[in-house]
Amino acid sequence: MNGKNISWFGRVSLGLGFAFLYVPILILIVYSFNASKLVTVLAGFSTQWYSVLFNDDAVISSFGLSLKIALLSSTMSVVLGTIAGLVLARFGPFRGKGLFAGMISAPMVMPEVIVGLSMLLLFVELQQWFGFPAERGVLTIWVGHVTLCMAYVTVVIRSRLVEMDRSIEEAAMDLGVRPLKIFFLITLPIIAPAIASSFLLAFTLSIDDLVITAFLSGPGSTTLPQLIFSRVRLGLNPEINALATITVLVVATLVVGANRVMVKAEQRRTRLAVAT
Amino acid sequence: MMSRLLSLRDSREAASRGARRPTWWQLLMPSGRSLVTAIPYGWLLLFFLVPFLFVLQISFSEVEIASPPYRALLTRAEDVLNIALNIGNYSYIFGDPLYFDAYLSSLYMALVTTLICLVIGYPIAYTIARAPEAKRNTLLMLVMLPFWTSFLVRVYAWMGILDNEGLLNKACIALGLIDTPMPLMHTQLSVQIVMVYAYLPFMILPLFSNLVKLDGRLLEAAADLGCRPWETFLKVTLPLSKNGVIAGSMLVFIPAVGEFVIPELVGTPESLMIGKVLWMEFFDNNNWPMAASVTIVMLALLILPIIYQHKREEKALARAAQR
């Protein structure tokens, strides 16, 4: 059963499944090179929508803002998420640990409208009491994204720490190395790949987020998803097809590239394991 | 001198063994560990838990033309402190069929989405889990790739297909299946299709990580004992993958209940989902107290599934840690 080949049933279900997942994206790409302004009519090859896109100042500036927020929030969420993962995986039981673990995992499943609204009301109340934050904008969006992304980072880091071989850490502890030093010299290098992949995950979550951003953004801070959303609401738009195509190609290149690096590393590890 | 040093050492050892109660300054001075824990803990308390208290508070408030647009619960006139708890929003939610229908249709849509994702996702996850190890990684990456691309882009991709003059209608007419375009866009069906499309990876991943641990020898044993393939599936594979099925279903169902973007872009204007109702109350009607009440009721519906899902995950992690 656990053989070398995939059964006909498996082939059919994979074929249909991947068709379902990829045909809409392929159609999207095809229509981005369409000469017609109507997105439902094919009328010859053209790259005009790409030049329209690159000359669209609103798109460029909102992309810049999205990029900035994504970099800032993924950096912060990796720091907080790594600490939280360490606390949950290594610190043993402490009072309030259950609540902590619950607050970590809840943002991942909770509908985003709930998270967005509740966080906005917090900021409004804070402003009433302390006059800070004075207005909604990059700072409030950043806090929202960090809270969402750190949940994902924590899960990745925690499961890596749980399955990690602890013998090196224990050896260092027996030799009297201080915990902080052990973390930076041993644990951190070992979990570095998990940190890198959780950074990428946090980055994509942040740059893609619409709902939480919509609640937490103010006038003058329009992110790329907000801009896309406001245009798509009005109907199909070939410029958005071009933008979507670029997004898909960039993401595909990054994911395939990261996957190859990981596969290579895995092979190297297997070879080492066989050699020793 | 020597004896004092010795006794100091003894007391320290005693304290570290927990035999003696810590002195007051040990209680006051936080250890390194609690300082480290306090950073993410404090962040989540302030930005995740405390906000819900404000939502609860504002849900008992009244709309007011002011900034922010709600009345404070506590007011002081002369020396009298007035507390005004307005339960009008809640009686409105439970009295008006619009809200009731919205909650019901959200739960229904989420449930159907979960079931369809399970039916489509299970064979895919199973096949990938049983595939040769060399291919597994690539196949899994192909499932994950759409998840990494923008959610909005994936919803938008279906707008061109489901449009009433879109590709699906054109293809059906060209094939001679229908004469006039079917109304596909802005129907319950279009919402359903796009929701399955958007949430499918969340079903496949937990199913895969469960099925990949399934011992192939059990399936061989069942086959040797005369089980037909579908019997093996029903009696061995499916019961053993129960945890994966539940985990995947929760990851699809809970967020799907509050989905806003999909019903907004491809849904009907008449039948509302609760995520969209919340959005409209907040952004279009500027009725923050009502939006807060809608949130509280939605939270009350979802809190049990969320806790259940969290407890299961913690158990799974504890099992992984033991191994």
Image: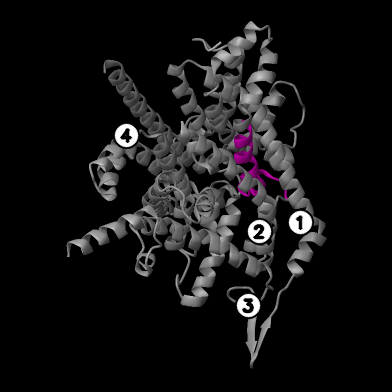
Badge 2 density bin: few <14, some 14–19, many ≥20, Cα 10 Å = many
Q: Is B136 within the magenta? A: no
| In the image, residue A236 above or below residue B13 | above
* Image disc number at residue A137: none
**Residue located beneath label 2 in the image:** B295
Does the residue at mark 2 contact the one at mark 1 (Cβ under 8 Å)?
A: no
Q: CA distance from mark 3 to mark 1?
A: 25 Å
Front residue of A23 and B309: B309
> What residue would you read off at disc 1?
B99
- Left or right, residue A246 beside residue A233: left
Quarter of the figure with the N terminus of chain A: top right
Q: Residue at x 32, y 24 (%)?
A: A264
Q: Is residue B268 magenta?
A: yes
Q: Which residue is depicted at the point 37% across and 53% down?
A: B17
Q: Give whichever of discs 2 and 3 has the lower sequence position.
A: 3
According to the picture, the residue beneath numbered tag 3 turns out to be B72
* Chain holding disc 1: B
